[in-house]
């Protein structure tokens, strides 16, 4: 294990994506193996299983780890090992001198797209694998579209199995071209392309001598240097704080505290969704009671017995306010003057994750921040066509479709444009009958002159 | 050709910020993990009617309880703790458990494996291990107390089946986990909806590694049962591990009893948890030891996970932690 400076090391989350069998799990195994993050007993177990399954007949015999099926390091479920595919996301952890990584190895199979969306939703970067022999496939395009929808800040494309195309630059350039074209069609901002062999290790942790025409950094170096979401966004964004609960310790004070000192204590527990808050800042409470907006200021920021001068996303803290206002779970505190109004009309894109199709007129639950309200799907306004990345008309949304909808809410929610406010623009669509999550929801800004005015 | 490098006009990652009013540096990874865990704990408490926290006195459950005290300060932890007692406990861990519950003013619920064995509802396994027997008393306690959410200290780095589990994990009427049909879990929006009879297991420290846990224990000065630190103990060698000599773990004739300086990396059923030779006497020593370790904590010290390739997955499917 590498020595990481834990005082300063930051957390970086990335997810794999790409079509089935393009080598995602093998790549993850390779990253873990070559960054020395696999411990002896794990390696022994995987080596044993690889041998039992007859893995390791591969020809070139180059490099260590060649004789083991690296995918077994993450494909941990019985069914996955039997079928040789990934079914659900595996989370793995490793650290280098620069960073601690949370790695989500996602499935490529179209049936399990919901799990890939799960892995990508919290990612700072998505590593899209492409088999050099196959190029960009429909499933690659689907995952790129998901990454775009979720506004994953960085896309890294790994053109894999470069060993199987004799390390050919021409093949790489061709795939790179296909990829950058798709990315441009989608408007993906930041895409880097690296030729790799997950199986043999080329350009994964170390640069390979077998691709002298590639002058960029190895994949791990790319991942070490990309800025994480919080590093990118927080400084720029206004303060947002969904209230999780009200802390009033009367009668249930933590042992050892002075009851006198906390007699009138009232604080609001939550995690900053974005921005920074300082003691004395003016904040506005967007109440769940229809359209209420009250302005007050921050009297104190508490965290487990310590008073802080300021807090920034994604810290969890307790805020005290100067005025005695009726605030409860579900309310949103925002920096005064940075928010228009909550709205009962939601214009959104959905990534539909349920086999049960969505039809117009459906009643659903919308979970946003710390609130859940009823919603009525008024219209389905389009569906993304993966071949052209353009939106066509649709009467319903089926499993894995990405589409746009208009939803009428039973009460107003302070939903913001996801493009600018990732945390307050995201919501879940939930089945009111069985409680299952049906879709990932992404709020879009209302085009000028459409919908109802947002003022309140 | 490699397109826009969005980052070039930004300050380098981790660049020092000066005054308190400067925008901010990113949270350290430990702070980020702490904040995530507290957010999860608060969500579950807000959305469920009867949560409980699994508390064994082991380091992960102690850590989780510590996070819960921070989440609700200055209020006390607003839920009971639940211990599934195998009857094969290290006495000092039970003592620690009771002292912690007392100190924090909590209510303790105990589910006893021994009582189930005495009533003939569970039978002792041939290998004497009781960890796998915890499932039945656990589910019994959950249904008897009508707990709808149970916090567990499971971490994804512990095992390849745990690596696959959601932070909020839905369990059916039989407590079963269905790894092939997990709910999507998007952003930090946790969907805890469940029907009558179902409950949810919540894993707030899913994303912590063993090293994170120890660094945090060191940083926060969290007290643990003494057997996590180096001490002398009478032990014997079995299955490549040091086993403590005790009421439920007696050496066979062929197994020589020795005195060694050891510590435990996990604390479970005394009959299947092994110790490692170690001189690490403080949390700081343990951080250094864990960082240099070549074995995972379960690989080094848990006989129950060696039973089969998919031991943990099978136990989880049946309703285990
Ligand atoms: N020659 C060669 N084979 C590779 C490479 N990477 C992966 N493979 C092989 O491709 C097959 C599929 O690899 P996986 O890593 O399981 O693919 P995956 O993308 O994780 O598949 P799913 O998760 O099921 O979508 C395995 O047989 C790998 O050994 C590579 O760089 N070169
Ligand atoms: Mg895979």
Image (spheres, helix red, strand yellow):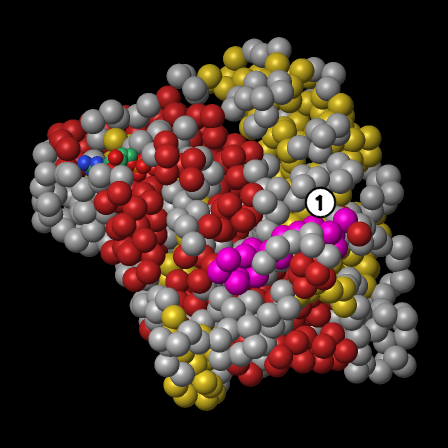
Q: Secondary structure at mark 1?
A: strand
Whether residue B132 appears in magenta in the rendering, the answer is: yes
Q: Is residue A109 left or right of residue B137?
A: left
Q: What residue lies at 46% left-to-right and 88% top-to-bottom?
A: B232
Q: What residue lies at 20% left-to-right and 27% top-to-bottom?
A: A133
Q: What residue is shown with label 1?
A: B199
Whether residue A229 appears in magenta in the rendering, the answer is: no
Q: From the viewer's perspective, is residue B99 above or below residue A64?
A: below
Q: What residue lies at 35% left-to-right and 29% top-to-bottom?
A: A19
Q: Residue A282's x, y, as percent?
A: 75, 60
Q: Residue A238's x, y, as percent?
A: 63, 53
Query: Is residue A235 at all visible to an observer of this figure?
Result: no
Q: Is residue A256 left or right of residue B232?
A: right
- Quadrant of the image occupied by residue B277: bottom left
Q: Is residue A126 left or right of residue B47?
A: left
Quadrant where the C terminus of chain B is found in the figure: bottom right
Residue A179 or A14: which is nearer the viewer?
A: A14
Q: Is residue B178 left or right of residue A4?
A: right
Q: What residue lies at 58% left-to-right and 12% top-to-bottom?
A: A394
Secondary structure that dominates the magenta span? helix
Q: From the viewer's perspective, is residue B286 above or below residue A418?
A: below
Q: Residue B298's x, y, as percent?
A: 44, 63
What's drawn in magenta, residue-wise? B125-143
Ligand 1's image quarter is top left
Assess disc 1: are there few (<14), some (14-19) or many (≥20) residues with their C-alpha within 10 Å of its C-alpha.
many
Residue A375 or B4: which is nearer the viewer?
A: A375
């Amino acid at each position: 294990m590498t020595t990481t400076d834990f005082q300063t090391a930051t957390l970086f989350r990335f997810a794999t994506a790409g079509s089935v069998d393009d080598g995602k799990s093998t790549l993850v195994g390779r990253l873990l193996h070559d960054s020395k993050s696999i411990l002896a007993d794990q390696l022994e177990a995987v080596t044993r299983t690889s041998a039992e399954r007859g893995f390791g007949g591969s020809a070139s015999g180059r490099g260590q780890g060649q004789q083991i099926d690296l995918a077994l390091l993450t494909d941990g479920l019985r069914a996955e090992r039997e079928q040789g595919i990934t079914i659900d996301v595996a989370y793995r952890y490793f650290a280098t001198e620069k960073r601690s990584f949370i790695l989500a190895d996602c499935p490529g199979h179209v049936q399990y797209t919901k799990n890939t969306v799960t892995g990508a939703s919290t990612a700072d970067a998505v590593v899209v694998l492409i088999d050099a022999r196959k190029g960009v496939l429909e499933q690659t395009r689907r995952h790129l579209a998901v990454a775009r929808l979720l506004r994953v800040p960085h896309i890294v494309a790994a053109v894999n199995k470069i060993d199987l195309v004799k390390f050919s630059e021409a093949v790489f350039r061709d795939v790179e071209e296909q990829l950058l074209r798709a990315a441009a069609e989608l408007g993906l901002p930041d895409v880097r392309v690296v030729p790799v062999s997950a199986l043999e290790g080329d350009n994964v942790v170390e640069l390979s001598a077998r691709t002298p025409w590639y002058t960029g950094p190895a994949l791990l170096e790319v991942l070490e240097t990309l800025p994480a979401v919080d590093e990118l966004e927080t400084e720029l964004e206004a303060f947002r704080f969904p209230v999780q609960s009200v802390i009033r310790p009367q009668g249930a004070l933590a042992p050892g505290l002075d009851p006198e000192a906390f007699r009138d204590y009232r604080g609001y527990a939550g995690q900053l969704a974005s921005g920074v808050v300082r003691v004395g800042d003016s904040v506005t409470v967007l109440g769940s009671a229809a359209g209420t907006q009250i302005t007050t200021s921050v009297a104190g920021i508490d965290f487990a017995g310590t008073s802080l001068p300021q807090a920034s996303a994604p810290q969890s803290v307790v805020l005290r306010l100067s005025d005695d206002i009726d605030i409860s779970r579900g309310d949103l505190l925002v920096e005064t003057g940075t928010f228009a109004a909550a709205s009962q009309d939601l214009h959104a894109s959905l990534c539909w994750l349920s086999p049960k199709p969505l039809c117009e007129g459906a009643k659903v639950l919308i979970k946003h921040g710390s609130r859940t309200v009823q919603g009525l799907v008024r219209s389905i306004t389009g569906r993304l066509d993966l071949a052209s990345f353009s939106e066509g008309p649709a009467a319903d949304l089926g499993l894995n479709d990405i589409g746009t909808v208009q939803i009428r809410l039973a009460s107003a929610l302070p939903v913001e444009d996801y493009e600018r406010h990732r945390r307050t623009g995201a919501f879940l669509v939930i089945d009111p009958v069985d409680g299952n999550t049906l879709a990932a929801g992404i709020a879009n800004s209302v085009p000028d002159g459409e919908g109802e005015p947002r003022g309140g | 050709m490699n397109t826009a490098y969005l980052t070039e006009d930004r300050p380098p990652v981790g660049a020092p910020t000066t005054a308190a009013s400067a925008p901010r540096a990113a949270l350290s990874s430990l702070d980020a993990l702490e904040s995530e865990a507290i957010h999860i704990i608060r969500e579950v408490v807000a959305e469920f009617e009867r949560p409980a926290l699994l508390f064994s006195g082991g380091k992960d459950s102690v850590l989780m309880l510590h996070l819960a005290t921070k989440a609700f300060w200055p209020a006390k932890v607003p839920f009971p703790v639940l211990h599934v007692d195998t009857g094969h406990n290290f006495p000092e861990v039970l003592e620690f458990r009771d002292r912690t519950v007392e100190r924090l003013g909590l209510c303790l619920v105990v589910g006893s494996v021994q009582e189930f064995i005495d009533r003939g509802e569970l039978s002792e396994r041939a290998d004497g291990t009781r960890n796998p027997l915890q499932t039945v008393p656990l589910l019994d306690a959950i249904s008897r107390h009508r707990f709808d959410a149970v916090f567990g200290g499971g971490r994804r780095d512990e095992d390849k089946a745990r690596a696959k589990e959601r932070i909020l994990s839905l369990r059916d009427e039989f407590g079963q986990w269905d790894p092939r049909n997990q709910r999507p879990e998007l952003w930090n929006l946790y969907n805890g909806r469940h029907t009558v009879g179902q409950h949810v297991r919540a894993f707030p420290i899913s994303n912590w590694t063993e090293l994170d846990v120890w660094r945090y224990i060191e940083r926060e000065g969290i007290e643990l049962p003494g057997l996590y630190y180096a001490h002398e103990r009478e032990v014997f060698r079995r299955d490549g591990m040091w086993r403590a000599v005790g009421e439920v773990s007696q050496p066979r004739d062929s197994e020589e009893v020795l005195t060694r300086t050891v510590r435990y990396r996990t604390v479970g059923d005394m009959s299947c948890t092994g110790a490692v030779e170690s001189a690490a006497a403080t949390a700081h020593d343990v951080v250094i030891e864990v960082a240099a370790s070549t074995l995972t904590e379960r690989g080094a010290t848990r006989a129950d996970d060696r039973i089969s390739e998919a031991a943990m997955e099978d136990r989880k499917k049946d309703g285990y932690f």
